[in-house]
Image: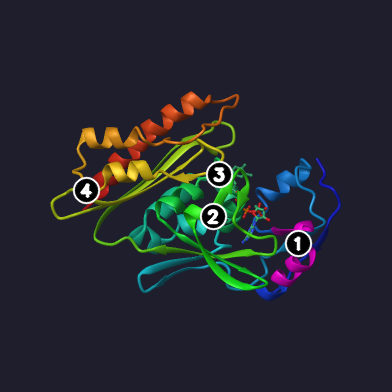
Amino acid sequence: MIPAQFDYQAPKTLDEAVALLAQHRDEAKILAGGHSLIPAMKLRLVQPQLLVDVSRIKDLSYIREESDQILIGAMTTHYQIESSSVLRQICPLLPECASHIGDVQVRNKGTIGGSLAHSDPAGDWPAVINALGAELVVVGSVGERAIKANDFFIDLLTTALGPSEILREIRIKKPQGRFGQSYQKVHHPASGFAVVGVAVTLNLGPNGSCESAGVGVTGVGSKAYRATAVEAALTGRPLDEQTIATAASHACDGIDANSDLYASGEYRRHLAQVYARRAIQAAASQVS
Ligand SMILES: Cc1cc2nc3c(=O)[nH]c(=O)nc-3n(C[C@H](O)[C@H](O)[C@H](O)COP(=O)(O)OP(=O)(O)OC[C@H]3O[C@@H](n4cnc5c(N)ncnc54)[C@H](O)[C@@H]3O)c2cc1C
């Protein structure tokens, strides 16, 4: 399949990229790893007149620690996150999630920023970024702003990004104290995407009860979401079997579940509850 004709620009700075997007608005698309955009162009689901390749812009690919935060550049690849020894120490949920994405080729080329900006309802990163309560820093012609993960994903393939905005960085608070994390996923057998994926991060107090919880779910609805009812059912309670089962039963509260040839909405809801329970148990078992 061959995409419709398009122009191509590879700016060297973020300012140049923003100026191109501001000039061409809806006719332009950013090209990152191309693993979602190019297939969509080949199927002619999108037909941008201009591709703005941001891969030559310096300093969009990094993993840094800055006081109590982890900063990840939007062009950081899944593989860079998967193989980061720093992240394995301070926030293992990130490399764990990366290891679940596609195959080696996809992880080598695909970027965290591209995945978040694409807002695929079965993408893995949106669940994790919701669970971690991350902030997404975007830059546009009127300057920079930070958007909370929960407000970033609007709907199927739709985010809070404006037409001339570029996702520049993901900011995550470093987990502190006694914490445990897990990402549990049902892989689609053909694509590898999440039929359902649940990310959990927990903090336990000195008496073993849950001080705080972050839970993100992907694959169930039209966009990934933060499962606040699960978080509320865990917080302040000891993590016994009953508490975990009750909390996990809220994984799809208020969500209209997708149905497709592979999984009905009812099956997805069931999987989400089972995998929420597994993810909470696995996160709790990691607390030192
Ligand atoms: C065979 C295959 C299997 C896959 N399996 C999985 C899987 O199991 N789990 C999973 O989560 N994903 C999977 N993916 C998707 C993969 O993770 C992609 O890397 C990701 O979805 C998009 O990242 P990208 O860098 O390739 O972005 P691109 O395809 O280049 O861009 C995607 C979209 O985001 C926009 N965009 C990109 N970067 C930015 C930015 N910095 N700011 C604003 N907008 C931006 C683009 O304009 C485009 O609309 C798979 C892909 C393939 C081809």
Q: Mark 2 sits on what residue? A: 152
Q: Position of residue 29 (x, y in %)?
A: 73, 57
For the rendered model, the colour scheme is: rainbow
- Label 1 residue SS: helix
Question: Residue drawn 65% across and 71% down?
Answer: 57
Q: Mark 4 sits on what residue? A: 236
User: Which badge, 4 or 1, comes first in the chain's sequence?
Assistant: 1
User: Which badge, 3 or 1, comes first in the chain's sequence?
Assistant: 1
- Label 4 residue SS: loop
User: Which badge, 4 or 2, comes first in the chain's sequence?
Assistant: 2
Q: Name the quadrant containing residue 86.
A: bottom left
Which mark, residue 83?
none
What is the three-letter code of the residue carrying label 1?
Arg
Q: Name the quadrant containing residue 89.
A: bottom left
User: Which badge, 3 or 2, comes first in the chain's sequence?
Assistant: 3
Crowdedness of circle 4 by 10 Å Cα count: few (<14), some, many (20+)? some
Q: Is residue 29 magenta-colored?
A: yes
Which mark, residue 103?
3
Which contiguous range is marked in magenta? 17-30
Residue 182 in sight in this render: yes
Question: Residue drawn 70% across and 70% down?
Answer: 18
Q: Mark 3 near ligand 1 (CB under 8 Å)?
A: yes
Q: Quadrant of the N terminus?
A: top right
Q: Is residue 21 magenta-colored?
A: yes
Residue 110 in sight in this render: no
